[in-house]
Amino acid sequence: MRRPLIAGNWKMNLTPSEGAALATTLRQRIGMRSDVEILLCPSFVALQAVGEAIRGSEMKLGAQDVFWRDAGAFTGQVSPLMLCAVGCEYVILGHSETRGRFGVADPDLDPTILSYFSETDASINRKLRAVLPHGLRPILCVGETLAEREAGQTERVLQTQLEGALQGVTADELYELVIAYEPVWAIGTGRVCEADEANRVCGFIRQTLRDRYGEDLATLVRILYGGSVKASNAHALLHQPEIDGALVGGASLNAEEFEQITYCAPKR
Ligand code: PEP
């Protein structure tokens, strides 16, 4: 059975000391849960402090991105080796924000800034292939924009993103893969995808994996939903048969809210 995974993506929030304080609070409240897997993904600079705060608990540490080389002249990048050295077990790959696809039009955001976040399916594929040999579990994010959804392109977009990211990767290598369905229009917007629609799309993702890799892998892979998950909507989402957990952004910064979301996961 797939154990639910509730992951907090803290994005570019919290200093190391603030992150350690939140992690310590969460550890006291939900640190020894075995019914759900709980993962914290702070910024790179807070990984060490948060890792120390949760050491010895059941909670896991993850990063929000990675570069695909182990070392070298790559200013500003962080390698899989470095993530492993600070205790990361997971890494988020291909988040819509690193792909330069934003759900909300921020009036303060100069449109030219988007080119600084121009992750592609090809770069995500490189990262995915680089982290697997290190035992780092990728959380591969896929999702359509509102315009793509309204044009009836959701399935085509997801298929392209999945095929691009998984190119050249065998089923054996993907044993630890997690996928997060994150409709871009639902991220940080407060507009959540209806639970039955999220379930339908997660089922489509699983079918795509089945077609490509066979039943064993498709059955094993956890598929999360992400996009404006809160304590008030988590129960309906997490009780869908194709949804195995949640990737939580904004609500993961609040200990009580995040704790409540973990209690919405079904016992499997
Ligand atoms: C996310 O960034 O992965 C996310 C789902 O954000 P939010 O929960 O804030 O919509």
Image (spheres, rainbow, N blue to C red):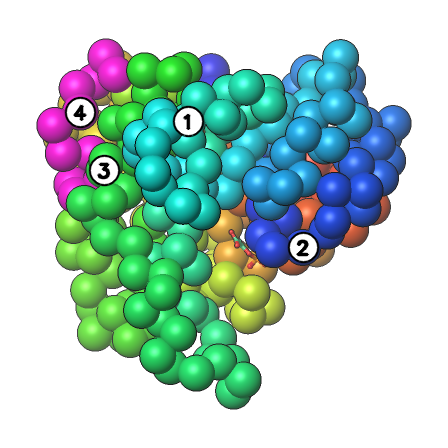
Residue 123 quadrant: top left
Residue labelled with disc 4: 169
- Residue drawn 16% across and 56% down? 156
Q: Nearer the viewer, mark 1 or mark 4?
A: 1
Label 2 vs label 1: CA separation? 22 Å
Q: Is mark 1 within 8 Å of ligand 1?
A: no
Disc 3 crowd rating (10 Å Cα; few below 14, some 14-19, many 20+) is many
Q: Which mark is residue 125?
A: 3
Marks 3, 4: nearer the viewer: 3
Question: Which secondary structure, mark 1?
Answer: helix
Name the element at disc 4: loop
Q: Residue at x 12, y 28 (%)?
A: 168
> Which region shows up in magenta?
162-173
The quadrant the C terminus occupies is: top right
Q: Nearer the viewer, mark 2 or mark 1?
A: 1
Q: Position of residue 196 (x, y in %)?
A: 44, 52
- How far, Cα to Cα, is label 1 from label 3? 14 Å
Is residue 199 shown left or right of residue 250? left
Q: Position of residue 207 (x, y in %)?
A: 22, 35
Image quadrant of ligand 1? bottom right
Give, as a three-letter code, the residue at label 3.
Asn
Compare residues 163 and 85 and report the one nearer the observer: 85
Q: Determine contact: label 2, label 4, CB under 8 Å.
A: no
Can residue 241 be seen here? The reply is: no
In contact (CB < 8 Å): disc 3 and disc 4: yes
Density class for disc 1 (Cα within 10 Å; few <14, some 14-19, many ≥20) is many
Q: Which residue matches tag 2?
A: 13
In magenta stretch: residue 222: no
Q: Which mark is residue 80?
A: 1
